[in-house]
Image: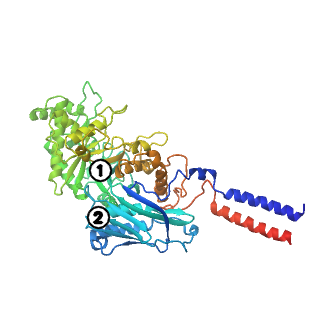
Amino acid sequence: MKPCLAFLVALSLQAAVAEWSYQTSWYEKARQDKVARGTVWPQPRSIDTTSVRYYLDPRSFKLEADSSSAAVSDPECKEVVDHALSRYGGLLFWIPEEDRAGVDGDEILDKLVLTITRGCTRYPSLESDESYSILVNSDGATLRAQTAWGALRGLETFSQLIYGENGKHVINGTSISDSPRFPHRGIMIDTARHYLPLPFILNHLDAMAYNKMNVLHWHIVDDQAFPFQSATFPDLSGKGAYTRKHVYTPDDVSQVLEFARLRGIRVIPEFDTPGHMMSWGQGHPEILTRCYPTSFQPDIYHLGPANPARETTYTFMRKLFEEIRQLFADEYFHVGGDEVRFQCWNSNEEVHQFMVQQGFPNSTQGFADLQGYYIRRILEILHQVPETTRGIVWQEIFDNFEITGDLTGLNLDTIIHVWEWNDTRYQGEPFREEMAKVTAAGYRTILSSCYYLNYISYGRDWPQYYECDPHDFQGTEAQKQLVIGGEACLWAEWVDSTNFIPRMWPRASAVAERLWSPQDVADSEAASPRMEEQRCRMVRRGIPAQPQGPSYCEYEWNILSQLPNYRPVITSSGLRVTEGLFHIMFLDVLVLAVVKCLA
């Protein structure tokens, strides 16, 4: 064989190897039906997508507010909208500039026009209208909403409709009419068992906005620590926080509230009482009940629940709640009420004498009466603070009033938060029966029983949250209307800033879709490709959402890069740019060799 031909054969083999290495891997091909593109999470109430594609040029595309609408003319709307347009301007496009392909000759979508048809409130509320509609066609793209809060949900949806293809940002012709199924779609975070630094709470609020969740239930204090810094009672955090650095100052709280407000998220504080108050006693032991050893409980703690027999306890709580209410904007306040151990009250002679004065028997019913008396006084305090305030309580408060046979002491504007369930860990009332009882009595309710994210297991567990529906109980349509939503809870005994976000997301995304989307959107297998896209979308936006099985994201989480994390990494196909260069070089050399051999 001539040296020229031998050289040509060698180059051909090298070119074949380069071409083979450049091909899409078998796993990517097998994965194509497992990951959706340009789909929305949570699933909208009504969506119609066409095959017509429009291309967006990141250099010229605009997000605009309709100047003739409240989006510009109403100051409260304009502030929220201006921040949102700036924020989403940085989220719509993620393909690195050096990897983008030109869109010359393609049908271009050049802008989205946002219209708000009503005036806006400064803060979102339980009654806020979050509906919106989107239309993308040859005439352009429009987003219409009644309020700024609906506009925020619509902008998130529009951002999710855009997908990448061959270096281009693409959106299909789409028509959407959407509104949430439930008005209360919350997540409870626990900053008492472990302190969460402010950046992680803000990162979590961004993730909530990406999933259209609208309530941050902030369980801010508990037995272990009191990190809320009170100006009225500085010893609460001064002696009750883990350290003086592990506190949330009023400025910290205000920053969380403003960050949340601009994303349409309410922040509801929880100061759990009369139980879970041991940290309060570090600075103010006078408000707690002193417990004494008994034959039944010789190792009982020396301080227990709040002391309901002392009028000074209620004076203290009034002053503290007035301070908290001036800082937190929402009209709802969670006062807890769960897991009160009656043994301590039973061991205290002062409490016994008070029960005799009130006519409460020395029995389970009597202690339920005592807790009911305490909670009634606390709710009266909330109603009397300068700003209108309504209470949320854990289900034990309702259960104890039911034990006494008199629910008249529990105001009907109180929301009952159902959390217990019947299994090997808790032998409480099965939550479906509890939901039926609470709503039959005329109370509004929130469900968390089947949304406890702190319980983890091997494998993909989000379908169990996805398939639990707040309306899955025996009751009339009127009872179902009293269910205002649900909350995913992440208790923090084993959670701190190192695992807070990954453990929360995307598992909480399953709860988000259950609470937003229509009830018949309930097939977790059908939802899996959208879940996978949503998880990778969050990772791309700087949320370290944990994986849901063997897979990869084109834009992987990179802890060393600044957020947002928009850089491609090695995938199962290898370094595409490098392979492409080798591929081109081999072909060029091969062509030159052929020419030389034939000359």
Identity of the residue drawn at 86% across and 61% down? 6
Identity of the residue drawn at 24% across and 51% down? 333
Alpha carbon of mark 2 to alpha carbon of mark 1: how far? 42 Å
Residue under circle 1? 237
Residue 57 x, y percent position in the rendering: 50, 71
Indicate whether 56 appears above or below 209: below
Q: Is residue 93 left or right of residue 246?
A: right
Residue under circle 2? 146
Residue 376 x, y percent position in the rendering: 16, 43
The residue closer to the viewer here, 352 or 459, is 459
Residue 467 x, y percent position in the rendering: 39, 43
Badge 1 amino acid: Ser
Under circle 1, the secondary element is: helix
Identity of the residue drawn at 40% across and 58% down? 47
Q: Is residue 5 left or right of residue 345?
A: right
- Residue 205 in sight from this viewpoint: no
- Residue 350 in sight from this viewpoint: yes
Rendered-image quadrant of the C terminus: bottom right
Badge 2 amino acid: Gln
Point out the frontmost of discs 2 and 1: 2
Q: Is residue 132 left or right of residue 138?
A: left
Indicate whether 301 appears above or below 543: above
The residue closer to the viewer here, 227 or 476, is 476
Under circle 2, the secondary element is: loop
Q: Is residue 542 left or right of residue 320?
A: right
N-terminal of the pair, mark 2 or mark 1, is: 2
Identity of the residue drawn at 18% across and 51% down? 382
Task: Determine the residue located farthest toward the top in the rendered image.
Answer: 295
Residue 169 x, y percent position in the rendering: 51, 66
Q: Residues within 10 Å of mark 2 (few under 14, many from 20)?
A: many
The residue closer to the viewer here, 309 or 569, is 569
Q: Residues within 10 Å of mark 1 (few under 14, many from 20)?
A: many
